[in-house]
Structures are given as structure tokens and as C-alpha cells.
Amino acid sequence: MVHDGAQTLIYNGRELRAKRQYQNKLKARLAAKLSRMRKGSRRWRKLQRSKRKQLRKLGHQIRDILHKQTTALVSTLHERGVQTVVIGDVRDLRRRVEYGPAANQRIHQMVTGMVRWLITYKAEQLGMRVVIQDEAYTSQECPRCGSRYKPRGREYTCSVCGFRFHRDGVGAINIRRKYLGQGPVVGVMASPTGVRWRPHLRARVARDKRERIPAL
């Protein structure tokens, strides 16, 4: 989720989540098969080779999605003249959550560190500054009146002033406000714009074609 003060962009992570879910199922299925084989046998070694090959392929696909999404994001910000990229700090998220096995697995498999590194690297290549900002309560605090409400679904609706917006969009708006030290939002916010991942998306370039973002 990105907010530049005028527009909120949602970068869809459905394809990435699907790859991670398939990766988990594949690991479980292959582990079950391996457990029924004699360790070191020919069949065991053959399945181990197949496991490494399949997981390596999935890893490449996941990295490809991350590269293309972050390249599209950084290029969009550069084209809009953004000079500073502010990223919410979620580095200790894994140590302070307990939402149950399924949710915990999703959280522990989040690639926030890789995404942060890719955005930082690519943004700095284009002359932008990257800042890490504390994001405590940013998805709970109403950008308009400042009251706190913990949303259960994707939509945030303030119980005090009635402000309604996408939950992650509220977080992005508040992270920007915290960094800039701004007051509450005044007026009506434009609806977020969704950006879907395309399997054959080509890396976008900045205004100056010589400033093409390098592949990692």
C-alpha cells in the first residue's frame, strides 16, 4: 500500500500469497513421502533431487514477482517526483504477534525484509531517500479525528467520526502523516487504486531511459 498525499495505490499480493501457499503444501507433501522411504535409498535420493528442483523453481518465481512489483512501485514514485520514500517499520512484528497457527505462519513467511531491501536499493539508484518510520497504531488511528479503532475486515470505519477507507490505506496515510508531522486529514479521500501483478510485466523505466533500474 502506497500513499503519496494525493492518491493511494494498492499493490496486489495475491499471486505472491498463492505461490507461498503452494510452497508450503509442496513441502508438506514431499516431507510426508520422504518419511515413508528409507533414508539414503535410491528412491529417497531421487525424491530429494526433485524436491530441491521444485523448491528452487518456486523460489525463482517468488523473487521474480518481488522484483517486478518493487520495480513498478519505485518507477511510479520516481515518475511522480517523490524524493523520500517512507517505509513502515515491521522488523519486530514476528516477535510480538500470536494470532493462531495459520495467521502466524503467514506472518512468519512475510517477505517484508526482502521487499524493504529491494525498494531501498532501487529507490536509491534513482536518487531517492529511504526512511524507516515507526508504524505503531497507524492502521488503527483515524486519519481524520485521531481516535483508535481496530478494524476486523479490509475496510476501516471510524466509530467516532464515520471516516471510511481501506484498512491498509489508513496505515499508509498515517505513516506519511507521522513522518511529516502533519495534522488530521480534511475532506474526502479518493478511493484507493488497485495495481495487479502481471506474469509478464516488464520493468518500467524512469523518465530518463538511461536511468533504467538494474535487475538484481
Image: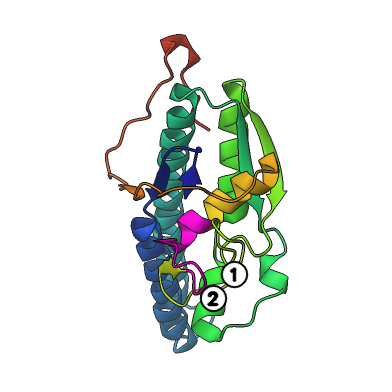
Q: Residue at x 49, y 69 (%)?
A: 158
Can residue 47 be seen here? The reply is: yes
- Tag 1: residue type? His
Mark 1 is surrounded, within 10 Å at the Cα level, by few (under 14), some (14 to 19) or many (20 or more) other residues, namely few
Element under label 2? helix
The residue stretch that appears in magenta: 158-170
The reply to whether residue 40 is visible in this rendering is no
* Residue marked by disc 2: 105
Residue at coordinates 43% horizontally, 65% vertically from top-left?
A: 20
In the rendered image, residue 14, in percent from the top left (x then y), is placed at 35, 60
In front here: 34 or 66? 66
Magenta span has 167?
yes
Q: Amino acid at mark 2?
A: Gln
Outermost residue, bottom side: 36
Tell me where residue 136 appears, x and y as whole percent.
69, 62
Residue 129 vertical placement versus 43 (above, below): above
CB under 8 Å between discs 1 and 2: yes
Q: Name the colouring of the figure.
A: rainbow
Disc 1 target residue:
108
In the displayed structure, does residue 53 sit left or right of residue 180? Answer: left
Q: Please, what secondary structure does the residue beneath circle 1 have? A: helix
Would residue 38 be found to the left or right of residue 17 on screen? right
Q: Position of residue 2 (x, y in %)?
A: 48, 45
Q: What crowding class fits label 2: few (fewer than 14 Cα within 10 Å), some (14-19), or many (20 or more)?
A: some
Q: CA distance from mark 1 to mark 2?
A: 5 Å
159 or 117, which is in the foreground? 159
Residue 64's label in the rendered image is none
Q: Looking at the image, which is closer to me, 2 or 202?
A: 2
Up-down relation of residue 82 to residue 46 (above or below)? above
Q: Which of 88/196 is in front?
A: 88
* 216 in the magenta segment: no
